[in-house]
Image (cartoon, rainbow, N blue to C red):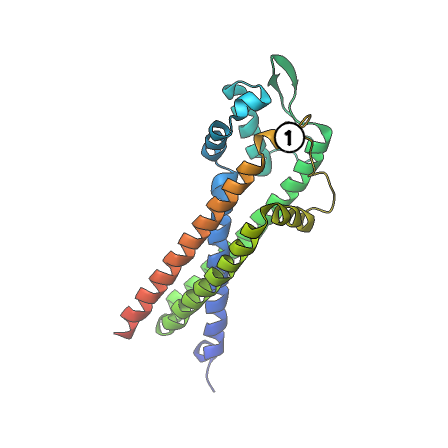
Amino acid sequence: MRTIKEKKSIWITCAVVNAICLIVLIFFVGIKLPSFGMWFYTWQYDINDTYAVVNMEPEDLHQVTRHMIRYMQGHLDRDDGLQIETVVGGQTRDFFSEIEIRHMVDVYDLFIVGLLIRDILVILLLFTSIFFLIWGRTHMKILFKAWRYGSAGVILILGTLVAVIAINWHHAFVVFHEIFFDNDYWILDARVDLLVNIVPYPFFITISVFIGVFFAVGLALLFAVSTILRRRLGR
């Protein structure tokens, strides 16, 4: 009777788990870079003329943004950690309104869940990778095949999803919020809520494009690397 390590089904399962973890982590990195990157916000503020729109000095808005990023990363208290006093139009005031804080609490929860999933995926990726490196060197073709088919399949799905979103961005934006938020706190008024002015529609369009392109490039690289490695093993 073959041992567990000799069963092909075990290696197929480990390879599939490894590929899924790797693909999702590439996607998460694509989200993290702009969402937690001050460079992305300042870039968008310049393009969208945000400083003039919210009537704030760059250094004041940057301070608020860095505070907001730390909040989304889970470094501040969930319920009371977001609010920050700043200067708007020459007047000192709290930056976030009550409804904005309620919405950002939901955003906080979403990111915390995402960070938890990321940590679990990293552990699974490391475990399955070590499993292959120590006991499964003769089964590496199975791993590279999972990477190749997994990345190719997700690229096809991503292409279809991009086409659907491009047809009606506004509808996709609304559907996204209806899926991930169980209230209407995300519906803000640009006349009174500053948050919707620092991250307007163009901001979300750009961040979506960035994430999509980053993910697509990552999947293409994974496909290319897995194809090369499989061919080398076949020689």
Q: Can I make out residue 128 in this image?
A: no
Return the x and y of residue 19 as percentages of the image width and height: 46, 63
Kind of residue indicated by mark 1: Leu
Q: Say which element carries label 1.
A: loop
Q: Where 141 sits versus 123, above or below?
A: below
The residue drawn where x is 53% and y is 22% is 51
Could one spot residue 145 in this view of the protein? yes
Name the quadrant containing residue 143. Answer: bottom left
Of residues 80 and 7, the one nearer the viewer is 80
> Going by the picture, which residue comes out furthest to the front?
167
Residue at (59, 23) in percent of width and height: 54
Picture layout, residue 52 above or below residue 77: above
Q: Residue at x 47, y 65 (%)?
A: 153
Pick whichever, 165 or 109, lies toward us.
165
Residue 182 x %, y %: 73, 47
Marks counted in the figure total 1
Residue lying at the far left of the rendered structure: 235
Q: Quadrant of residue 193?
A: top right
Q: Which residue is mark 1?
A: 82
For mark 1, does the 10 Å Cα neighbourhood hold few (<14), some (14 to 19), or many (20 or more) residues?
Answer: many
Seen as rendered, the residue at the extreme top is 90
State the image coordinates of residue 138 (x, y, percent, origin top left).
35, 74
The quadrant the C terminus occupies is bottom left
Is 168 situated above or below 70? below
